[in-house]
Amino acid sequence: MEPPVNSIRLSQTAKDQLLKLKRSTKIEQWNILCRWAFCRSLAETAPPSLVPIPADSNLEMTWRIFGGDMADILILALRQRCDRDGLELTPDILSQQFRLHLHRGIGYLAGDSNIRKIEHLVNLASVNEKADLL
């Protein structure tokens, strides 16, 4: 399945937020934290704001590293979300929406004062799953 990007360079703000999350959760791999963040943003009902995101940090990863074994599932989740938001599924829009969701999710996780260890991420996912079932 065709990924929305071949590689992504994060903003310096996102990198700083990920460093904070790495310290608090003890999750050392950038890609794992980024997957959590991406999924956190996809779970929001509102689409992300169309804001410019600079690629001004030295933190870059390929789609293969970002997605790992879940790469195809993450592509499908992005495509489904774009379709739900009434967006065309063009390569440019998928790339844009991926970046917006990833950065928004990083901001959400870093700004959540309840996330102080890995268990809090798991609890967050459990709460969202229960809410979806109701």
Image (cartoon, rainbow, N blue to C red):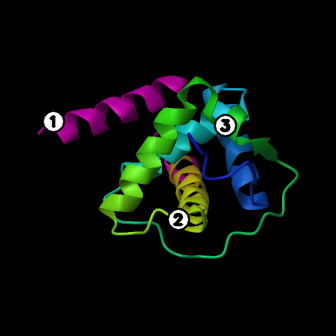
In the foreground, 7 or 119: 7
Reading the chain from its start, which is encountered first: label 1 or label 2? Answer: 2
Residue 26 as seen in the image, left or right of residue 55: left
From the image, give the main secondary structure of the stretch colored magenta. Answer: helix
Q: Quadrant of the N terminus?
A: top right
Instruction: List x then y, in percent, for residue 69.
Output: 58, 23
Residue located farthest toward the left when viewing the structure as drawn: 134
The residue sitting at 30% across, 39% down in the picture is 128
Label 3: which secondary element: helix
Reading the chain from its start, which is encountered first: label 3 or label 1? Answer: 3
Q: Is residue 127 magenta?
A: yes
Residue 114 as seen in the image, left or right of residue 17: left
Reading the chain from its start, which is encountered first: label 2 or label 3? Answer: 3
Q: Amino acid at mark 1?
A: Leu
The residue carrying mark 3 is 66
Residue 58 as seen in the image, left or right of residue 89: right
Instruction: List x then y, in percent, for residue 106.
Output: 58, 50
Q: Amino acid at mark 2?
A: Thr
**Residue extent of the magenta highlight:** 110-134
Instruction: List x then y, in percent, for residue 49.
Output: 49, 73
In the image, is residue 92 above or below residue 19? below
Cβ–Cβ under 8 Å for marks 1 and 2: no
The residue carrying mark 1 is 133
The residue carrying mark 2 is 90
Residue located farthest toward the bottom when viewing the structure as drawn: 51
Q: Nearer the viewer, mark 2 or mark 3?
A: 2
The residue sitting at 52% across, 65% down in the picture is 90
In the rendered image, which quarter is residue 125 located in?
top left
